[in-house]
């Protein structure tokens, strides 16, 4: 168990299309445990493997709601998605920026858990948003890519001028 360094916007690791995990071994379980430690240390609600520089299709999530179990998802695939909803999002790899992003309102995701068991997650609200945000990371996509070019440019200018003390990532994924 250890906290790894979170890669920040500008790091090429965030732009890689990650590979499927071929077998769930000790190394992958260690990665899951480290992702959880790193996510909690950063006060985040989700974290994907490329955010710690590992190009594998693995992410963890904990939206801190009593009725939603935290977990890890390996080789996730979206099997259903419906409706749209707009809400605020942030990212541990772009600390300090938050913006409204349109996402599917409801999703169903299948994949493997830390032990290699097949899981199926039916998600709405924050969990749905979190799963879509993390899955984007596995394809090298960041939430700012889902904004208009003008909005993205304004936000990135603002981020570039931010003081380090303003770049607090709390509650981001
Ligand atoms: Zn993120």
Image: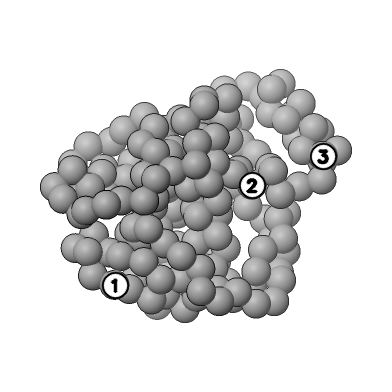
Foreground: disc 1 or disc 2: 1
In this rendering, is residue 46 above or below 83? Answer: above
Pointer 1: what residue? 118
Asked if the beta carbon under badge 1 is closer than 8 A to the nearest atom of ligand 1, the reply is no
- The answer to whether residue 157 is left or right of residue 143 is right
Residue 111 quadrant: bottom left
Task: Out of 121 and 19, give the one closest to the viewer.
Answer: 19
Question: How far apart in space, not on screen, are marks 3 and 1 (Cα)?
Answer: 38 Å
- The answer to whether residue 3 is left or right of residue 27 is right
Circle 3 residues within 10 Å: few <14, some 14–19, many ≥20: few
Task: Out of 153 and 80, give the one closest to the viewer.
Answer: 80
Give the residue drawn at x 64%, y 47%: 143
Q: Secondary structure at mark 3?
A: helix
Asked if the beta carbon under badge 2 is closer than 8 A to the nearest atom of ligand 1, the reply is yes
Q: Position of residue 128 (x, y in %)?
A: 54, 68
Q: Position of residue 113 (x, y in %)?
A: 28, 64
In this rendering, is residue 95 above or below 45? Answer: above
Task: Out of 42 and 140, give the one closest to the viewer.
Answer: 140
Residue 87 quadrant: bottom right
Q: Position of residue 12 (x, y in %)?
A: 52, 26
Pointer 2: what residue? 143
Q: Which numbered marker is on residue 149?
A: 3
C-beta proximity under 8 Å, tags 1 and 2: no
Question: How far apart in space, not on screen, are marks 3 and 2 (Cα)?
Answer: 12 Å
Give the residue drawn at x 33%, y 73%: 119
Instruction: Pick the quarter of the image with the N terminus.
Output: top left
- The answer to whether residue 117 is left or right of residue 160 is left
Q: Which numbered marker is on residue 102?
A: none
Give the residue drawn at x 45%, y 54%: 45
């Amino acid at each position: 168990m250890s906290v790894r360094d979170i890669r920040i916007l500008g790091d090429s690791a965030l732009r890689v299309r990650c590979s499927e995990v071929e077998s769930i071994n000790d190394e992958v379980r260690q990665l899951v445990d480290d992702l959880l430690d790193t996510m909690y240390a950063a006060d985040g609600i989700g974290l994907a493997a490329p955010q710690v520089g590992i190009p594998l299709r693995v992410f963890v999530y904990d939206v801190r709601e009593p009725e939603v179990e935290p977990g890890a998802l390996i080789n996730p695939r979206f099997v259903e998605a419906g409706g749209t909803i707009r809400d605020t999002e942030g990212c541990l790899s772009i600390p300090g920026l938050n913006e409204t992003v349109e996402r599917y309102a409801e999703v169903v995701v299948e994949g493997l858990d830390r032990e290699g068991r097949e899981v199926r997650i039916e998600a709405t609200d924050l969990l749905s948003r979190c799963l879509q945000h993390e899955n984007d990371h596995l394809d090298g996509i960041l939430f700012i890519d889902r904004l208009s070019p003008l909005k993205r440019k304004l936000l990135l200018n603002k981020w570039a001028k931010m003081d380090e003390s303003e770049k607090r990532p709390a509650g981001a994924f």
